Image: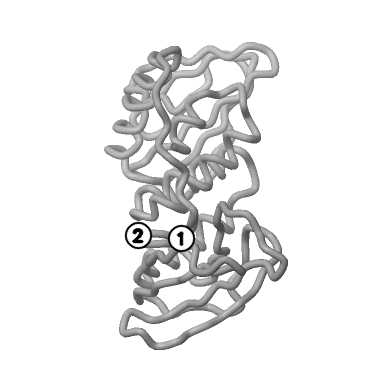
């Protein structure tokens, strides 16, 4: 999972096994289906025995440096998973907070007990101008509007007991938003969703990437690497 391979690397898959290989320099994706033997060449994966790989061009691939860095960090963390580490206290305001997001229509999320009246979310621009207000009885609320590209905002969560917290967030530039949306529109398979999480991370949308990794981790609890990336 999340391994990087060099040219001339042989790959052997058993019956029913499946691997997705992405060339980050070109965005070309090859799907290898077992049983079979394959060889990784400079620009494509070729079959030695079995069914030839299927090819898909121009996926939105992350940088090779990012993939390599994540692979190394995940491997080290998984090896140390038996060590008990103290988790930081969970904040009240969960998303979005303190960073850029790759969407103009976020769903606000928090961790707090609701009073009889539920919760109120109020959004202001960076200069203090009122932008939007919404209410919810649950611990999340989809924004009732699209925010502007490349702008900074603050949002405040309140309940019957008063203000529960305030956080800031920033929408990304238009090129980043377009790349994120193009990647999101291609998420038809599990492999697509893994690549999408990488793309979000590559863009610097760390919060969105962690949410994507967390969703993948819930889908595949047998892959501890996903849970590591969701932290």
Task: Give the number of marks.
Answer: 2
Which structural element holds mark 1? loop
Q: Is residue 36 positioned above or below 150 on the image? A: above
**Residue 75 screen position, x and y as percent:** 38, 20
**Residue 99 screen position, x and y as percent:** 35, 59
Depth check, front residue: 7 or 74 = 74
Label of residue 217 in the image:
none
Determine the residue located farthest toward the front in the rendered image: 161
Q: Are marks 1 and 2 in contact (CB under 8 Å)?
A: yes
Q: Residue at x 63, y 35 (%)?
A: 218
The quadrant in which residue 82 appears is: top left
Depth check, front residue: 109 or 72 = 109
Depth check, front residue: 115 or 21 = 115
Q: Residue at x 40, y 26 (%)?
A: 86
The quadrant in which residue 63 appears is: top left
Q: Is residue 36 visible?
A: yes
Determine the residue located farthest toward the bottom in the rendered image: 129
Q: Which residue is mark 2?
A: 99
Label of residue 96 in the image:
1
Q: CA distance from mark 1 to mark 2?
A: 8 Å
Which structural element holds mark 2? loop
Q: Is residue 113 positioned above or below 27 on the image? A: below
Q: Is residue 207 positioned above or below 155 on the image? A: above
**Residue 121 screen position, x and y as percent:** 55, 72
Q: Is residue 58 visible?
A: no
Q: Crowding at label 1, few (<14), some or many (≥20) Cα neighbours within 10 Å?
A: many
Q: Residue at x 35, y 59 (%)?
A: 98
């Amino acid at each position: 999972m999340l391994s990087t391979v060099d040219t001339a690397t042989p790959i052997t898959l058993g019956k029913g096994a499946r691997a997705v290989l992405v060339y980050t320099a070109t965005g070309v994706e090859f799907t290898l289906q077992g049983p079979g033997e394959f060889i990784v060449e400079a620009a494509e994966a070729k079959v030695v025995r079995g069914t030839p790989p299927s090819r898909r061009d121009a996926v939105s691939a992350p940088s090779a440096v990012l993939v390599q860095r994540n692979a190394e960090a995940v491997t080290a963390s998984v090896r140390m998973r038996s060590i008990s580490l103290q988790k930081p206290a969970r904040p009240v305001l969960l998303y979005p907070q303190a960073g850029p997001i790759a969407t103009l229509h976020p769903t606000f999320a928090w961790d707090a007990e609701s009073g009889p009246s539920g919760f109120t979310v109020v959004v202001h621009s960076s200069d203090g101008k009122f932008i939007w207000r919404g209410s919810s009885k649950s611990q999340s609320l989809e924004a009732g509007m699209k925010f502007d590209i490349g702008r900074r905002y603050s949002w405040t969560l309140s309940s019957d007991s008063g203000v529960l917290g305030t956080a800031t967030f920033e929408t990304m530039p238009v090129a980043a938003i377009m790349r994120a949306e193009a990647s999101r529109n291609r998420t038809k398979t599990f492999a697509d969703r893994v690549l999408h999480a990488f793309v979000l991370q590559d863009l610097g949308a760390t919060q969105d990437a962690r949410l994507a990794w967390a969703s993948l981790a819930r889908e595949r609890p047998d892959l501890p690497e996903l849970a590591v990336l969701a932290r």
